[in-house]
Image (cartoon, rainbow, N blue to C red):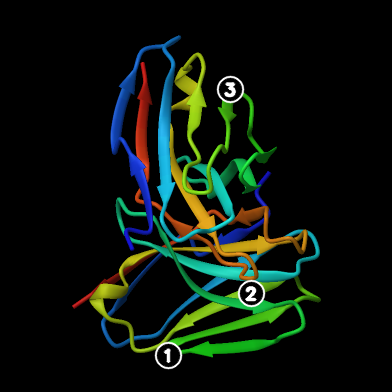
Amino acid sequence: SQQGEEDPQALSIQEGENATMNCSYKTSINNLQWYRQNSGRGLVHLILIRSNEREKHSGRLRVTLDTSKKSSSLLITASRAADTASYFCATDGTGTASKLTFGTGTRLQVTL
Amino acid sequence: NAGVTQTPKFQVLKTGQSMTLQCAQDMNHEYMSWYRQDPGMGLRLIHYSVGAGITDQGEVPNGYNVSRSTTEDFPLRLLSAAPSQTSVYFCASRETGFEWQYFGPGTRLTVT
């Protein structure tokens, strides 16, 4: 069963705008990770936030985590055409990092 | 480093045929895993291994076998292919002590 549901399923913005995508999950977690997948390629790890953290930044990425609401958001600021991809959240509920559970993904389209 | 490599990139099988999807990594990672990705769904874990000689089932193991005789290689075997196994298969690896995974480019499998 899917642990994460992502919202929206698809997002289209213009270059320079910010993109926000959300992830909700069902059970308690040790950490939540975000991955990017370019069309026809494998996933690339973007950022990890632990259950005791509320916000984390990496370059143009900002991730928040609300464990009381079992939700996370990924903000990409000043989007570029190269950010066009699908974005997935993945949760680690076991603490062993052996069983990541992925969400359904958000397809982001950034147009010039 | 080549990272995580997968062969073949594409494969078409007839129902009932068997085949092995190959996965190799040159990063000396102890942990390796196999996922399948279906349209509209996130990645689902098939099998994983925390080291040579050790494998375990993930969320959707039925119809698949794995073995881990070396640190580098983690092949996925389909013993009798079924149309329901039509999917894109990703192999991933993880370094001990870190929680995120490195993904291969994927194998697109079609079973007719």
Q: Which residue is mark 3?
A: B63
- Whether discs 2 and 1 lie on one chain: the answer is yes
Instruction: Give percent across and percent down for residue B32.
Output: 55, 50
Task: Name the subunit of mark 1.
Answer: A
Instruction: Give percent across and percent down for residue A41.
Output: 32, 54
Verify CB contact (< 8 Å) between mark 1 and mark 3. no
Closer-to-camera residue (A71/A59): A59
**Distance Cα–Cα, label 2 vs label 1:** 18 Å
Residue lying at 76% horizontally and 66% vertically, measured from the top left:
A29
Verify CB contact (< 8 Å) between mark 2 and mark 1. no
Instruction: Identify which amino acid the numbered label 1 is placed on.
Output: Gly
SS label for mark 2? strand
In the rendering, which numbered label is found on residue A72? 2
**Distance Cα–Cα, label 1 vs label 3:** 42 Å
**Distance Cα–Cα, label 3 vs label 2:** 34 Å
Instruction: Give percent across and percent down for residue B12.
Output: 31, 22
